[in-house]
Amino acid sequence: MQPALAPDQAGQLASQLAALACQCLLDEARLAPKPGLVDSRGSGAHQDLTLALMCRSARALQLAFLAMARAAWQQQASTTLREQLGSLGRAGEQAMLQASGGVNTHRGAIWAIGLLVAAAAMDSSQLQASAVCQRAAALAQLPDRLLPAQPRKGELACQRYGVGGARGEAQQGFPHITRLALPALQASRARGDGEVNARLNALLAIMSRLDDTCLLSRGGMPGLTLVQSGAQAVLAAGGVATLPGRRQLYQLEQDMLAQRLSPGGAADLLAATLLLDRLPGMAGN
Ligand SMILES: CC(C)(COP(=O)(O)OP(=O)(O)OC[C@H]1O[C@@H](n2cnc3c(N)ncnc32)[C@H](O[C@H]2O[C@H](COP(=O)(O)OP(=O)(O)OP(=O)(O)O)[C@@H](O)[C@H]2O)[C@@H]1O)[C@@H](O)C(=O)NCCC(=O)NCCS
Ligand SMILES: Nc1ncnc2[nH]cnc12
């Protein structure tokens, strides 16, 4: 158990966590070239999203993340905390819809990053990725009796294709981040690829395996398979920092745009990866 902090110190750490979460969403949105996704070049496979909209949505979420960090501060996982976070998450979704003019920009990110911010706040003395993901999983496994009973697109895709989706990913402790994205980010940095390429390789590592319900909703199983095997081909060619890898990435992007495929779930998990990468270095640790 961490030593008790003075209330103003605790408030400062909660604010830092929320600001960091928001910054990671901005960094993900601006990173380019991301196949199918909104980035600094344009709107990818989307007609209703722009970079300006993604950034407005990201900034609008800082208060929701702050409220989640405060609610979870030095708490143990419990149904009461889970339901509190669920209500704060739904309020965050309303703030997102207001900022984006009704478009779903970050619902998956509110879920994943909200849980991780809360998990970090539960014990700010243990901020290594594995510990934070374990606490987030414990929260995600608890029931939320206040959850409205209307199935969403993601849940419908999970039922139809027998995959775990955003909920399963969190309940399992974010394996696509801990086993794929963070190792890819670190290996790429160690090779001297440069930060932009390291982040892109981390995104491709997630895309190569994730059962992304955004891809399933838009392209069915053939769409998901195309993206997973295309991302594997980029990595097998040496990653985005190499010429053969860049060529594969360009080909993958053309194929995805032709079929309106966008890996929104992988984008959320990349933002969450950036958060977990930076948490241990947060001031005060
Ligand atoms: C538990 C919830 C996450 C609900 O999840 P569910 O799967 O039932 O439904 P959705 O809300 O539809 O989908 C969840 C979003 O999660 C992202 N995602 C998808 N696959 C995965 C995966 N395998 N692992 C992790 N994350 C995943 C994805 O979000 C991104 O895509 C969004 C855009 O999607 P969509 O609207 O489908 O957009 P388009 O394809 O562009 O649509 P059209 O234009 O074609 O119409 C974007 O938001 C990205 O973020 C999925 O969309 C959770 O929502 C929930 O229960 N929330 C309640 C609050 C709560 O409890 N919070 C807890 C504390 S924070
Ligand atoms: N950059 C991005 N483009 C489209 N959908 C997203 N969901 C989260 N980040 C996204």
Image (cartoon, helix red, strand yellow):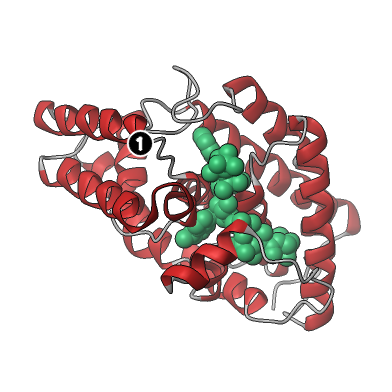
Q: Describe residue 276's horizontal placement relative to residue 95 as left or right.
A: left
Q: Is residue 44 left or right of residue 27?
A: left
Tell which of 8 and 56 is nearer to you: 56
Which sits in the foreground, 12 or 247?
247
Question: Residue placed farthest to the right in the image?
Answer: 7
Q: Residue at x 69, y 79 (%)?
A: 1
Please say if 15 is above or below 145: above
* Residue at the image point whose x is 66% and y is 49% from the top: 107
Q: Please determine whether, in this image, residue 267 is positioned above or below residue 144.
A: above
Q: Quadrant of residue 70?
A: bottom right
Label 1 Cα neighbours within 10 Å, binned few <14 / some 14-19 / many ≥20: some
Does 154 sit left or right of 198 as displayed? right
Helix, strand, or loop for circle 1? loop
Residue 220, percent across and down?
39, 55
Residue 171, above or below 100: below
Q: Residue at x 23, y 32 (%)?
A: 249
Where's residue 144, x and y in %? 77, 76
Say which quarter of the image contains residue 175: bottom left
Q: The C terminus is located in which quarter? A: bottom right
> How far from the left and from the top, in percent, is residue 95?
82, 41
Is any part of residue 120 visible from this angle? no
Which residue is under mark 1? 259
Q: Residue at x 25, y 48 (%)?
A: 226
Q: Residue furthest top?
A: 41
Image x and y of residue 276, in percent: 51, 54
Total numbered circles: 1
Whether residue 40 appears in this view of the structure is yes
User: Which sits in the foreground, 273 or 167?
Assistant: 167
